[in-house]
Image (cartoon, helix red, strand yellow):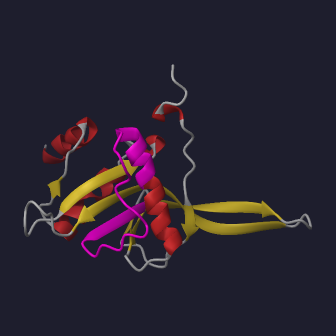
């Protein structure tokens, strides 16, 4: 057993201020992170991208917070959380934030299929998988992006896609 293996890394989920607008509310809240979003929100997507990279053994993350590509559209799955900090005075400070537990990225125009959008990557925290998070937002994605291409789906994504067709 190799403890340096990607399987044994602790997953510290990023937090960010609760967004004012959410395109989809359901089990989890889906938040579109625009190109001009605060840096902390874009860094949350990047951090989730690093979890994706580590799990699927890619060379780099699928998203960089400083890469302001207008062709890319990224989303975070978020849920409300309260962060408690104790000040030096002993006073407790509560901050209501959003905890990101998943992300995905689309290209509005896929370079190999002009006129077609593409889903490039999806990552959900292991505890949130197979709980209907992606299934719930799938109709929203289909409405928003049409019949989009799915770039290099793994076995779990292929099984998901098969269920969507039946």
Q: Does residue 146 appear to the left or right of 128 in the view shown?
A: left
Viewer-nearest residue: 90 or 28: 90
Whether 164 is drawn above or below 9: the answer is below
Magenta segment includes 162:
no
Q: Where does the image place residue 150, in percent across and percent down from the top left?
A: 18, 52
Q: Residue at x 69, y 68 (%)?
A: 95
Seen as rendered, the residue at the extreme top is 1
In the image, farthest residue toward the left: 114
Residue 7 % position (x, y): 47, 32
Q: Which residues are magenta?
A: 49-76
> Quarter of the image holding residue 25?
bottom left
Residue at 28 percent of width and 76 percent of height: 70
Which residue is rendered at x = 53% and y = 70% of the image?
40
**Outermost residue toward the right in this view:** 89
Q: Is residue 96 left or right of residue 99?
A: right
Looking at the rendered image, the quarter that the C terminus falls into is: top left
Q: Is residue 34 left or right of residue 16?
A: left
Q: Residue 96, image x and y in percent?
A: 64, 68
In this view, 30 is above or below 102: below
Pinpoint residue 122: horizontal percent, then vertical percent: 33, 52
Q: Residue at x 49, y 62 (%)?
A: 44
Q: Is residue 154 above or below residue 27?
A: above
């Amino acid at each position: 057993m190799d403890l340096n293996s990607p399987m044994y890394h602790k997953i510290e989920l990023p937090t960010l201020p609760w967004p004012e607008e959410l395109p989809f509310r359901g089990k989890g809240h889906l938040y579109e992170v625009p190109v001009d979003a605060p840096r902390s929100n874009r860094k949350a997507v990047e951090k989730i991208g690093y979890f994706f990279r580590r799990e699927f053994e890619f060379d780099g993350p699928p998203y960089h917070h400083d890469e302001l590509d207008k062709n890319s559209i990224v989303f975070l799955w978020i849920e409300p959380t309260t962060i408690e900090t104790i000040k030096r005075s002993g006073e407790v400070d509560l901050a209501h934030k959003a905890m990101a537990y998943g992300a995905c990225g689309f290209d509005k125009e896929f370079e190999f299929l002009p006129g077609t959008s593409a889903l490039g990557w999806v990552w959900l925290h292991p505890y949130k998988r197979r709980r209907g998070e992606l299934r719930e937002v799938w109709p929203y994605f289909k409405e928003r992006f049409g019949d989009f291409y799915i770039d290099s789906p793994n076995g779990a994504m292929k099984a998901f896609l098969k269920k969507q067709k039946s």
